Amino acid sequence: MAEFDSPKIEYTLTIDGKYYNTLDIESFSLMMKDPSYCYKFYWLEAIVQLISEGVSETTFDAVIDEMICNAWYSVREFHIHLSGISADGQVRDGLERAVLKLTELSDLPANASKVEIKNAIAEHNEELKVYKEQLTNMVPYRALAGFFNKSDEPVVWNSIRRMIDYIDRINREVVLLPYTLGSESKLKKKIHFQDAWVAMIQDQTVSILGWIQYEKVKWLQNNNPEVPGLIYKLAPMDEKMRKLNNVRKSWEGILDICEVRDVFTDQPVVSKQYDVDHFIPWSFVMNDELWNLMPMDPSLNSSKNNRLPKWNPFFERFAKNQFLMYTLIHKSAVIRKLYEACYRDNLHSIWAGQELYKKGNTETEFYNILQKNMQPVYDSARRQGYEIWNRG
């Protein structure tokens, strides 16, 4: 994604051939400036998505529901903390707390559809009410702060009623705002989108959502410094992106030569009757590197799912199988050729090419290199909240 600091949009709206208004894009670009919490990004993202669908008026309640849907997958599947964790270990972001509360109340899977999530929200709306209301306390108002600089009138932040009057006055007398707010209370409060801004946002939806995603990723990466591949963890990915075919062929070649024992059952792996799976979950590492892959019992693969195996004793068994592959890479021309076929999709880590798979490592040296590079990743996943799989 190209790096840019604000949406590159120049827009003059013409209605019936007459000059109507020049939108204040500079102030619009400040709508995500200096956020205190991540849900400011999700607020603007939800508004843009609703406008792109032809919505001209909505409520706080509907926008919050959209935000929960947009954050659901990242929080549930990848344990992303939207605004980090406080010193006492508590979740800081109100949107993340809302997602976690809905998780407690429902049996929704991590990859639930938007329709399923919204149905669950409706079913448990009363229990979620306090979490949703917290999200409306300041962001709907502070998101417009960049426009307020056009006025000499001081902003009245300590009164919602006076803020609504202030926003309406700024919109009428100073600068056209993207939205104004109704007088309704709490989650029932209406949001009125301005026609000129609706037209611009509908024309520029892709650019604006790309900008929001870029800013959101920067924020999330800063608050989840140990999480790799975070940009790929904002929405479900196509399973076709997984590249395991050449790894499977390599293990098939090895099974033609010698016995390989399942890391978890200690039983011989049967040719063509196993899954190729990640020791550290794919959802955390977001890659298909050869050094993290193993043949395993298909029934256990579904049980393991998105969890970490116990480091002891399973890492030692895993490393033993990895060393078996390593030995054959340097002894068998057939296995060497199968290994080389993995270069494009499964061998990108510099340390693996320069240290792990170089010829001449003893079993102890190989084990130490693998442990040195894998254990910090494993520990990071554990700190991020990945559960331990209680197998064995």
Image: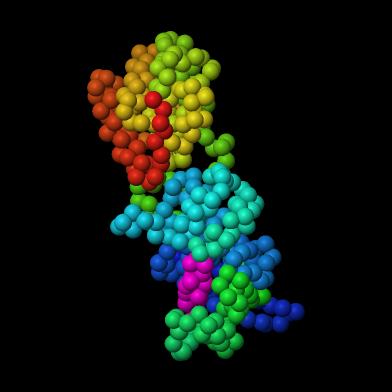
Quadrant where the C terminus sits is top left
Image x and y of residue 361, in percent? 26, 21
Farthest top residue? Answer: 257
Queried whether the magenta region covers residue 135, the answer comes back as yes
Residue 65: image location, x then y, percent: 58, 60
As drawn, is 383 to the left or to the right of 18?
A: left
Which residue is farthest right? 16
Q: Residue at x 30, y 57 (%)?
A: 87
Residue 22 occupies quadrant: bottom right
Task: Answer with the quarter of the image where residue 327 lies.
Answer: top left
Q: Nearer the viewer, residue 107 or 301?
A: 107
> How far from the left and from the top, in percent, is residue 231?
46, 50
Q: Is residue 337 magenta?
A: no
Residues 329 and 223: in front is 223
Instruction: Say which residue appears at 48% left-offset and 26% top-offset.
Output: 300
Would residue 73 appear left or right of 315 to someone viewing this image? right
Query: Residue at the spot x=59%, y=66% of the render?
Result: 61
Q: Residue at x 61, y 64 (%)?
A: 62
Q: How is the image coloured?
A: rainbow
Q: Which residue is at the front of the view, 174 or 61? A: 61
Residue 137 seen in the current view: yes
Please give the range of residues in magenta: 133-148
Answer yes or no: is residue 2 visible. Answer: no
Vertical arrangement, residue 226 with respect to residue 143, above or below: above
Residue 319, compared with residue 94, is above or below; it is: above
**What secondary structure predominates along the stretch shown in magenta?**
helix
Is the residue 181 above or below the residue 169 in the image?
A: above
Point out residue 307 in the picture as x, y percentages from the top left corner. 43, 36
As rendered, which of 329 and 298 lies closer to the eye? 298
